[in-house]
C-alpha cells in the first residue's frame, strides 16, 4: 500500500496522530503545500517574518524526517489539483490530512475528496480535545467562553502520542530544496521555527527558568519574552501541539503545585480551544462583518486611516508602537493586539476584517480561528457577551507603558498629521 500524508498545521513528529496513522504503509509520500493567499482589501502575501518562521519550521521538519529515512515535498498551488496528480503519478492508494478550522480549509478538503480516486482520511490533531471527547455536540457549542470553560476545564487530558520510531520510505519524487528564509529573526524576538526550537522554549519557560510562576503578573507586558510564554508561533504552525503544552504545565503543577499563573496559561489554551471549535461551527460566518448573528457596527473604509494604522503612523503613540513591533518582528502581545484592534474599530471606525487581514499577513502565530475569532470579539460581532471591547487608549498607555519605554523603543511618537486631506487637484476652480 502506498499512502500520501499532507502536512498542514501539524509540522511535527511528536503527537501527530495523522502521521502515525499512515506509518504502516509500504511507501509514504509526505507533502506540504504552501498556503494560498485569499486576498482582499489589498492585503496580500505573507509578511517577511511569518514567511521566515514557516520556512524554518519546514526545514526543521525535513531534517527530523531525514533521520527516519523520509523527506518532505514542498509544493505551491491548489491542493485539490496537486494531490490528485501526485496520487496518479505515484500510484497512491490512500491520502491523509489533518483537520483544520476555516471555511476555505473545509471547502478545500471537500473539493479534494471529490476529485480523489482513493479514500481521504481526515485526522484531528489541532485541539486539546477530540470531537468525541467534548461534553456537547459541536452544533451545541456554548456561545460564550465562560460556559465553555466550565464544561471543559476538569476534563482529563489524554497523553501526547510518541513520535514514530520508523517511517516507510518515500516513492521516487523530485524533492526540491526548501528555500532559505527571506529574512532573519528580529533581535527583539529571536525565535526560530521548528519543533526542536518550540520544545526548547517550552522547557525553558516552564521548567528551567520557571517563568510560568509569574505568568499571571507579567502576561500583559508589551514586549516579547518579557512576560509572555511566546509559545503561540509554534502552536499555530503545529510545531508544538496544544496537548504537549498542557501536559507540560500539568506536570509542573504536580511537582510544584498549581497557582494563578499555571491556571492562567491553561485558561488561555482553553480560549484557543474555544475559538477553534467555534470556527468549525461558524464556518463562513467567521469572516462576515456581523458574524453569525449579523451584529453590525457603524464603520466605513477610509483608505488613508487604514494605511496610517498599518504603518504605525496614527495619532495614538502606543498603537503606533504596537504596529511597528508587529511588522518588524511578526509578533505583538495579547494586550498590544487588543489595543491596536480597538483603535481600528472604535477610533478609526473601520471594518474589523481589514485589521484581521493585516494581522494574518504578519503574525508568526497566525491561525484562522484565533485571529478572526479575537477580532470578532473586539468588534462585538463574535463571542463577547458585552458586544465588543472599547479600550481607553490613554488609560492603556498609563497602565502598560507608564514610562513610555515601549513607545520610545518602537518609535510610536509620530509627527501630527491632518485628519483629512483634500485633493484640490481633482476639482475645478469655480468662481463664486
Image (cartoon, rainbow, N blue to C red):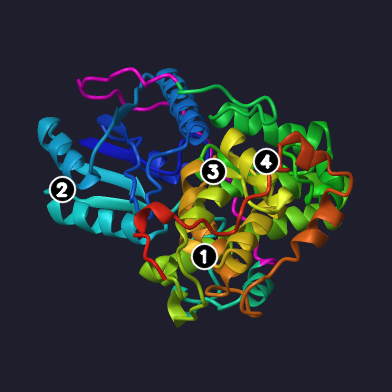
Left or right of 366 in this view: 83: left
Which disc, if any, is residue 118? 2
Tell us which disc is closer to us: 3 or 1: 1
Bin the neighbour count of mark 4 within 10 Å (Cα to Cα): few under 14, some 14-19, many 20 and up.
many
SS category of the residue bearing label 4: loop
Label 3, secondary structure: give it. loop
Tag 3: Cα neighbours inside 10 Å, few (<14), some, or many (≥20)?
many
Residue 179, position as x, y percentages in the image:
38, 20
Q: At numbered mark 2, what does the secondary structure look like: helix, strand or loop?
A: loop
Residue nearest the observer in this picture, 413 or 216: 413
- Provide the residue designation for mark 3: 363
Kindly report the distance in space between the C-alpha atoms of the residues bearing marks 2 and 3.
Answer: 36 Å
Q: Position of residue 222 (x, y in %)?
A: 75, 45
26 is higher (above) or lower (below) than 145: above
Residue at 63 percent across and 27 percent down: it is 186
Tell which tag, 2 or 3, sits nearer the viewer: 3
Location of mark 1 (residue): 350
Relative placement, left or right, of 86 versus 308 is: left
Whether residue 174 appears in magenta in the rendering, the answer is yes
Between 243 and 297, the residue placed more toward the observer is 297
User: What separation in Å lies between label 1 and label 2 (alpha carbons)?
Assistant: 46 Å
Quarter of the image for the C terminus: give it. bottom left
User: Are circles 1 and 2 on residues that touch, CB within 8 Å?
Assistant: no
Q: Is residue 255 visible?
A: no
Highlighted magenta segment, given as a residue range: 153-180
Amino acid at each position: 500500500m502506498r499512502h500520501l500524508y499532507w502536512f498542514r498545521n501539524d509540522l511535527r513528529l511528536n503527537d501527530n496522530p495523522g502521521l502515525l496513522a499512515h506509518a504502516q504503509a509500504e511507501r509514504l509520500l509526505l507533502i506540504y503545500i504552501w498556503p494560498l493567499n485569499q486576498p482582499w482589501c489589498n492585503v496580500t502575501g505573507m509578511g517577511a517574518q511569518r514567511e521566515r518562521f514557516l520556512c524554518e519550521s519546514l526545514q526543521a521538519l525535513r531534517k527530523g524526517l531525514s533521520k527516519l529515512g523520509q523527506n518532505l515535498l514542498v509544493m505551491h498551488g491548489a491542493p485539490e489539483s496537486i494531490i490528485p496528480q501526485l496520487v496518479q503519478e505515484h500510484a497512491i492508494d490512500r491520502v491523509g490530512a489533518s483537520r483544520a478550522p476555516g471555511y476555505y480549509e473545509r471547502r478545500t478538503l471537500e473539493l479534494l475528496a471529490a476529485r480523489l480516486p482513493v479514500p481521504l482520511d481526515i485526522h484531528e490533531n489541532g485541539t486539546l480535545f477530540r470531537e468525541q471527547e467534548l461534553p456537547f455536540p459541536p452544533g451545541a457549542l456554548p456561545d460564550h467562553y465562560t460556559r465553555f470553560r466550565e464544561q471543559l476545564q476538569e476534563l482529563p487530558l489524554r497523553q501526547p502520542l510518541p513520535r514514530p520510531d520508523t517511517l516507510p520510505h518515500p516513492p521516487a519524487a523530485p524533492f526540491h530544496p526548501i528555500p532559505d528564509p527571506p529574512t532573519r529573526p528580529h533581535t527583539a524576538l529571536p525565535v526560530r521555527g521548528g519543533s526542536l526550537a518550540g520544545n526548547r522554549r517550552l522547557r525553558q519557560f516552564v521548567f528551567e527558568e520557571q517563568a510560568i510562576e509569574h505568568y499571571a503578573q507579567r502576561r500583559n507586558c508589551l514586549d516579547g519574552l518579557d512576560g509572555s510564554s511566546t509559545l503561540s508561533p509554534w502552536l499555530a504552525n503545529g510545531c508544538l501541539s496544544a496537548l504537549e503544552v498542557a501536559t507540560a504545565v500539568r506536570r509542573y503543577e504536580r511537582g510544584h503545585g498549581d497557582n494563578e499563573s499555571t491556571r492562567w496559561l491553561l485558561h488561555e489554551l482553553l480560549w484557543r480551544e474555544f475559538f477553534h471549535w467555534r470556527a468549525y461551527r461558524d464556518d463562513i460566518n467567521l469572516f462576515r462583518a456581523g458574524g453569525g448573528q449579523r451584529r453590525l457596527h457603524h464603520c466605513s473604509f477610509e483608505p488613508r486611516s487604514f494605511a496610517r494604522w498599518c504603518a504605525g503612523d496614527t495619532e495614538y503613540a502606543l498603537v503606533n508602537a504596537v504596529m511597528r513591533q508587529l511588522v518588524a518582528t511578526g509578533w505583538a502581545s495579547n494586550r498590544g493586539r487588543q489595543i491596536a484592534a480597538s483603535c481600528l474599530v472604535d477610533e478609526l471606525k473601520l471594518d474589523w476584517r481589514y485589521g484581521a487581514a493585516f494581522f494574518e499577513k504578519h503574525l508568526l502565530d497566525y491561525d484562522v480561528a484565533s485571529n478572526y475569532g479575537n477580532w470578532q470579539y473586539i468588534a462585538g460581532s463574535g463571542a463577547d457577551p458585552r458586544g465588543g471591547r472599547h479600550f481607553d487608549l490613554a488609560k492603556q498607555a498609563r497602565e502598560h507603558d507608564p514610562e513610555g519605554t515601549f513607545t520610545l523603543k518602537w518609535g510610536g511618537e509620530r509627527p501630527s498629521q491632518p485628519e483629512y486631506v483634500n485633493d484640490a487637484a481633482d476639482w475645478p476652480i469655480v468662481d463664486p
